[in-house]
Amino acid sequence: DEIERGDVPKCIQCYMKEKSVSEEAARQYVDGLLGNAWKELHKECTEATSNGTSHPLVHCALNLARMAQFMYQHGDAYGFAERDYPVEPILKLMVESV
């Protein structure tokens, strides 16, 4: 959808061009990066909680990352609003829980 609207290239398109790989290979690479980032985020949060140094802002940032992945993991739930994504309840939950 973003490419059709003329938006700037995203990470998948940039990786495809830089490495001369297929879209599928680029998506697998980016999925691997995301998986590693999630592991690191969870590790940091777990360590902070077990050390007693957990800060509400850390949990807020983690929940914001979760929301962003939810909104974009199966397409663009924000920029292409005609799709049937249950975004409003998630946003309400995030705002009210802070």
Image: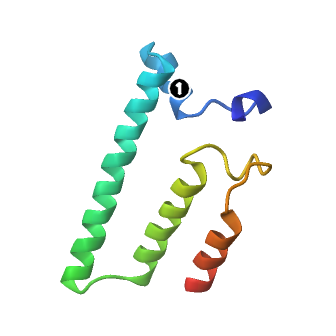
Nearer-the-camera pick, 26 or 18: 26
Please indicate whether residue 4 sits to the left or right of residue 54 in the image: right
Nearer-the-camera pick, 63 or 44: 63
Q: How is the image coloured?
A: rainbow
Dot 1 corresponds to which residue?
A: 14
> Which residue corresponds to the image point at 27% horizontal and 84% vertical from the top-left?
53
Which quarter shows the N terminus? top right
Please indicate whether residue 36 sits to the left or right of residue 6 in the image: left
Measured as percent of width and height from the top left, residue 4 is found at 76, 28
Measured as percent of width and height from the top left, residue 41 is found at 33, 61
> Which residue corresponds to the image point at 42% horizontal and 36% vertical from the top-left?
30
Report the number of numbered marks: 1
| Quarter residue 56 falls in | bottom left
Measured as percent of width and height from the top left, residue 22 is found at 47, 16
* Identity, as a three-letter code, of the amino acid under mark 1: Cys
Query: Is residue 27 in view from this perspective?
Result: yes
Please indicate whether residue 36 sits to the left or right of residue 20 in the image: left
Q: Is residue 59 above or below residue 52?
A: above
Name the residue furthest front.
Answer: 84
Q: Is residue 86 above or below residue 29?
A: below
| Quarter residue 98 falls in | bottom right
> Which residue corresponds to the image point at 39% horizontal and 31% vertical from the top-left?
28
Measured as percent of width and height from the top left, residue 68 is found at 56, 57
Query: Is residue 98 in view from this perspective?
Result: no
Query: How many residues crowd around disc 1 within 10 Å: few (fewer than 14), some, or many (20 or more)?
Result: few
Q: Is residue 11 above or below residue 72?
A: above
Q: Secondary structure at mark 1?
A: helix
